[in-house]
Image: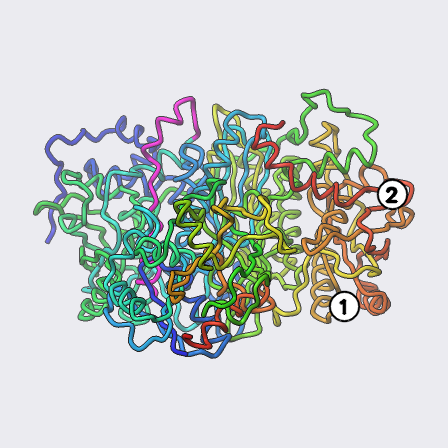
Amino acid sequence: MKEQPVALPGEPKVDLEQARGHGLAPDEYAKIEKLLGRTPTFTELGVFSVMWSEHCSYKSSRLHLKKLPSKSPLVVQGPGENAGAIDVGDGWAAVFKIESHNHPSFVEPYQGAATGVGGILRDIFTMGARPIANMDSLKFGSFDHPRTRYLLGGVVGGIGGYGNCVGVPTVAGEVMFDPAYNGNILVNAFCLGLVRKDEMMSARARGPGNPVIYVGSATGRDGIHGASLLASAEFGKESDAKRPTVQVGDPFTEKLLIEACLEAGKTGAIVAIQDMGAAGLTSSSSEMAARGGLGIELDLDRIPLREAGLTPYEILLSESQERMLIVGERGREAELMAVFEKWDLHAVAIGTITEDRRWRARWHGQTVADIPVGALADEAPLYDRPAAPRKPLPTSHPPQDGRVKEGVTPSAGLRALLDSPNVASKKWVYRQYDSMVQSNTIEGPGGDAAVMRIKHSIRGIALKVDSNPRACALDPYLGAVATVCEAARNVACVGARPVGITNCLNYGNPERPEVMWDFVRGVEGLRDAANAFGAPVVSGNVSFYNETEGRGIMPTPTIAVLGSMADFSKHVGQFFRNPGDAIAILRTARPSLAASEYAATFGVDGGALSPIDLAKEAALVDALVGGVEDGLIQSAHDVSEGGLAVAIAEACFNPAGNFGAEIDSARLGGTDAAGLFGEGPSTVVLSLRDVDVARVEKLFAGRGFEFSVVGRVTREARLKVSSVFDEDVNELVRIYREAIPRRLKGGD
Amino acid sequence: MKWGVVRFPGSLDDGDAIWALADVMGQEAFILWHKEESIRGAECVLLPGGFSYGDYLRTGAIARFSPIMKSVAKFAADGGLVIGICNGFQILCEAHLLPGALTRNRTLSFICERVHVRVENASTPFTRAAHNGDVLRLPIKHGEGLYVAPEDELRQMEERGQVVLRYVDASGRESDDANLNGSTRAIAGVANERFNVFGLMPHPEHAVEPMLGGTDGLKIFQSIAQGPR
């Protein structure tokens, strides 16, 4: 039945102006007319505008993302589905992905962050995997900025409010404060799920005649154009006016959806399933059909609505939360409906899979949209945007409060860094998250990486999310490489081998050549580092347009690394454990102050980044994991923000009782600011039993990185670096723990 | 002992309770669905943590009206053992099977942390494997765990020994810092007058394995497994 879609009474006229208002460029509009062979209806224009938005189509990034490695013997599912999956042994696949919810969180922090968590959870359980752990990477503006406290409180409250309520532990994360994010915070949410390898679900439609089933919350007017107008454009002065494009989350319904969808999956009657996320019903239906090379017909009169009077345009573009679209097996609808009824969820058949590769929507007896499926997905615009190198961006700021620039004593430097919100304990944040539910969390927040066990198995999974925007600001390529190395090192510190990567690439406006250059170089860095560790990139997300009034963020590729452990009981933590143990450092190069917290804190120029030797980095990670697996390492802690001095101090802060350390400064290879507080390339602080030192030395010899014993763990809680400083560890802990709570109380 | 763990929509620590009881302790434990009307021969009913029905109205306020709760109330009235953990405690208070109520933490935020509680009455069926004054290390994770009750009721509860657990520091001393949620009289767990219904905010089911925060929670379940007095 061929029938021309009709314009509905009272609908705005469709022309170039209307298309521009929808965020479509003139050549994009021309392409739509060509693909359809006619002028689109208003509804169709809306559909194209969301599907061809940067957020949904990756039109500026697709070309470059192809460079990323996505294969290894362990890859069960690469990019292209709701999430990627890696074999973690004993028949289990780890399904994981990270995604941004930056723009909504800046406009409405609690709901923006909450729905970010909700969205990433749905990407995981639609793969048939039970979500077992969440992480978040958060970037805020400076603590002095008037909005920062409000945004921090809202985002942390939203992540907790949603995550705690669905029974998925939040086990790790990172938080950074820098003036570069004053006008654009970043909220990147990660979820890990577990599924039997042979029980994975898909988002690929099959079987013409199969019913399309809608499950979950009713459709309302919220979130319309969240993907196109909110996520795919910069902020101006009127960002508050975009608040209605932010959705509102309902974690209780999400919890029911998790249980019901996993239970429904066990029936075998689900052919395909996808979350109605960005671009809602439109994207989920067209993407599932496109993956299967099929068509789909939707009956909009059957969509459950929150209020009467929604137009087809609104129904198709709504981003109301907690809604799933399922392609069921024909004849087995009743089995699926019974499961959803058990969980008191609304489920209704709203359409059919067709053979004709058209995406068709009917409403009130007429066709309101009729588009070739390929036009929405494969035919979306693809841009090779111009990229032009830029000068390094400033990563430190002249001190505003008269803090000394020169002549900082090592003791004052250490104390100032422990008091920096970027270095200090993030307990104020993570104690608002349930990190224990499901009884799998062996190492929770606060360590180098989280460690999850797999029940009924001795295998474990380590996970960590990292970013290093200051390094990326100096050099977008080296910064991205350093970020991957850091995340890989963090999972290695607990004893896990890096086996998979997911990324969230946060950048400014890609239409600016220097931003595009940052992005392209970032992807190349990610590619090279991922190859070096043999850890493929199996899923990810790009967030452009993180700009306000023309000022962009620092380039911020956020990298989550998944580590696999043969035996989780062998993991180690970051804290010293036994007085008398030797303290050693592993190092691939001399540290520098480039991109360091020290440089930012004291407003000094840290200079340029040192080159990174990826072969050495991979060797260090490999050797470290081997050492932990052989039981030769008592503790391992990665040197990051604050440098070596801070890392050794942190290793003393054992919650079971503080330790001290005696360090021979002569063995540090330099006790200037760079030696004590410099960051990167890689350094790891180890403690090991005296009897194991010779074996470890042998194990690490000839691997291309430095191994040196530099001191000893002491029972007395003092941190002594000979002729440099002698600090009371209990006092350092106090500074470290109080830094964020004190600022929130308004004490600074 | 046969344990029935109630699963409400929004229950979250139901699986953890089953894991602790069945997989770790080797007890017989099964799920009781909230729409069921029978407790199917359970000798102890456990109401788990979570956000039953989303807790959008008031924690535990809707769950108390579910079909299974009628049977739980009857079971309790007949002297059966009932334990409510976190949201389960909130539900038992809402159902008036336990005195008092749980309100917003004084921090006005969710708190997830390992705390210490002191056993104030080791003669109950829920604590008899411990001794008076024993300090247990258990996690709390809740936003609404500040226990309140009218002053004269609290006095009577103390006299009767119904205050079973109290927040203390690691050495067993009461202190304001150790009472994270700000509960009245640092109360962490209470029993009814007959001592067959017990509610506590800390999660014993999350303290049953050395690698996951210690094994002090076993004390509670081992006590119950000895059966009613």
Display colour scheme? rainbow
Q: Residue B115's image quarter? A: bottom right
Q: Which chain does the numbered disc 2 sit on?
A: A
Q: CA distance from mark 1 to mark 2?
A: 27 Å
Residue A612 among magenta residues: no
Amino acid on which the number 1 mark rests in the picture:
Leu
User: From where the camera sits, is residue A26 visible?
Assistant: yes
User: Is disc 1 placed on a helix, strand or loop?
Assistant: loop
- Residue A550 x %, y %: 50, 25
- Residue A607 x %, y %: 75, 33
- The answer to whether B67 appears left or right of A172 in the picture is left
According to the image, label 2 marks what residue?
Answer: A670
Dividing the image into 4 quarters, which one contains the N terminus of chain A?
bottom left
Q: Mark 1, mark 2: which one is toward the viewer?
A: 1
Sooner in the amino-acid sequence: mark 1 or mark 2: 1
According to the image, label 1 marks what residue?
Answer: A632
Q: Are marks 1 and 2 on the same chain?
A: yes
Q: Which chain does the numbered disc 1 sit on?
A: A
Q: Which residues are magenta?
A: A234-262
Amino acid on which the number 2 mark rests in the picture:
Gly
In the image, residue A231 above or below residue A241: below
